[in-house]
């Protein structure tokens, strides 16, 4: 009896007001958006997009699957996890972050030994091509974490957790998170970060905790990359 009550409470905590098929509708729409983005970047539009509001439009496009699904199902955005949280949960995330960076560092070292440019090198090259880093920093530090956490943790992870349990849900959503960035060298680091963010959502049932940690991670990485570009001779040519 007690076990049944615990199972019922767990099922209620994991419940979401959308259907399993809605996950795949969202993923399909995201794939179409990413395909269009990939074509645009492959044609050399990446730096031009980063110099204007184009990056914000790209991030807004990540919300399109949510708008479609939520409008069709008549779901309130609060279902994504806009709830209260304890600040200690953010401390747990910061404490676990070094473990994620160990994996990411090992991955990047391996890439360098193989003569493959890491994601950091590409970010440095992008900064060097920009007339002003304002839009790129604004989107990367503020806008991208909010939009991505709403889709990948608030929507995908919640739904997958309901269907498969939190571990498989975190794994599936983080793998899709890594693939959505359209950069093979960044796939593993992004997926590792995504798993950590999903775990924090699982602990808190609040999207604010992964958003805040995502903001901190992006702010540290992009500020460090921009500072590096200001040092003479960092990027040849």
Image: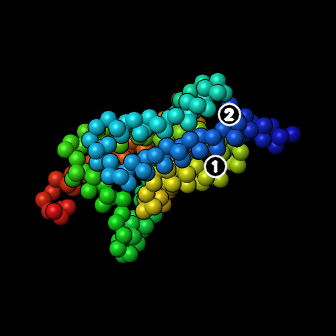
Give left or right: position of 36 versus 199. left
Residue name at image x 61 percent, y 52 percent: 172
Label 1 element class: helix
Q: Secondary structure at mark 2?
A: loop
> Residue at the spot x=34%, y=66% of the render?
117
Q: CA distance from mark 2 to mark 1?
A: 15 Å
Where, quadrant-wise, is the C terminus in this rendering?
bottom left
Q: What's the colour scheme?
A: rainbow
Query: Where 175 sits versus 48, above or below?
Result: below
Residue 169 tag number: 1
* Residue 11 at x, y percent in the picture: 74, 38
Q: Are marks 2 and 1 in contact (CB under 8 Å)?
A: no
Can the viewer see residue 58 in this picture? yes
Side of 115 relative to 35 (left or right) = left
For disc 2, the marked residue is 18
| Label tally | 2
Across and down, in percent, residue 203 comes to 58, 42
Which residue sits at x=70%, y=41%? 20
The percent position of residue 123, horizontal first and vertical second, equals 31, 54
Foreground: disc 2 or disc 1: 2
Whether residue 196 can be seen here: no
Viewer-closest of 174 and 45: 45
Q: Residue at (54%, 47%) from the top-left corner?
A: 31
Residue situated in front as seen by the camera: 119 or 55? 55
Residue 26 in the image: x percent, y percent? 59, 40
Q: Is residue 75 left or right of residue 10?
A: left
């Amino acid at each position: 009896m007690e076990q049944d009550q615990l199972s019922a409470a767990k099922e209620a905590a994991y419940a979401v007001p959308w259907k399993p098929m809605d996950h795949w509708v969202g993923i399909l729409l995201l794939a179409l958006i990413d395909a269009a983005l990939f074509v645009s970047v492959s044609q050399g539009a990446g730096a031009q997009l980063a110099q204007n509001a184009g990056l914000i439009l790209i991030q807004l496009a990540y919300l399109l699957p949510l708008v479609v699904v939520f409008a069709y199902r008549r779901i309130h955005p609060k279902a994504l996890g806009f709830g209260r949280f304890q600040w200690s949960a953010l401390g747990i995330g910061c404490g676990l972050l070094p473990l994620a960076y160990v994996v990411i560092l090992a991955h990047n070292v391996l890439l360098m030994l193989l003569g493959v440019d890491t994601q950091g090198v590409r970010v440095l090259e992008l900064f060097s091509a920009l007339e002003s880093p304002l839009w790129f920093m604004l989107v990367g530090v503020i806008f991208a974490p909010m939009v991505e956490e709403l889709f990948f943790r608030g929507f995908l992870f919640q739904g997958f957790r309901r269907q498969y349990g939190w571990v498989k849900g975190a794994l599936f959503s983080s793998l899709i998170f890594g693939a959505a960035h359209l950069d093979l060298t960044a796939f593993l680091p992004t997926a590792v970060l995504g798993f950590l963010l999903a775990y924090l959502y699982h602990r808190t049932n609040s999207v604010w905790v992964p958003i805040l940690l995502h903001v901190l991670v992006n702010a540290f990485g992009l500020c460090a990359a921009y500072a590096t570009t200001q040092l003479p001779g960092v990027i040849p040519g």
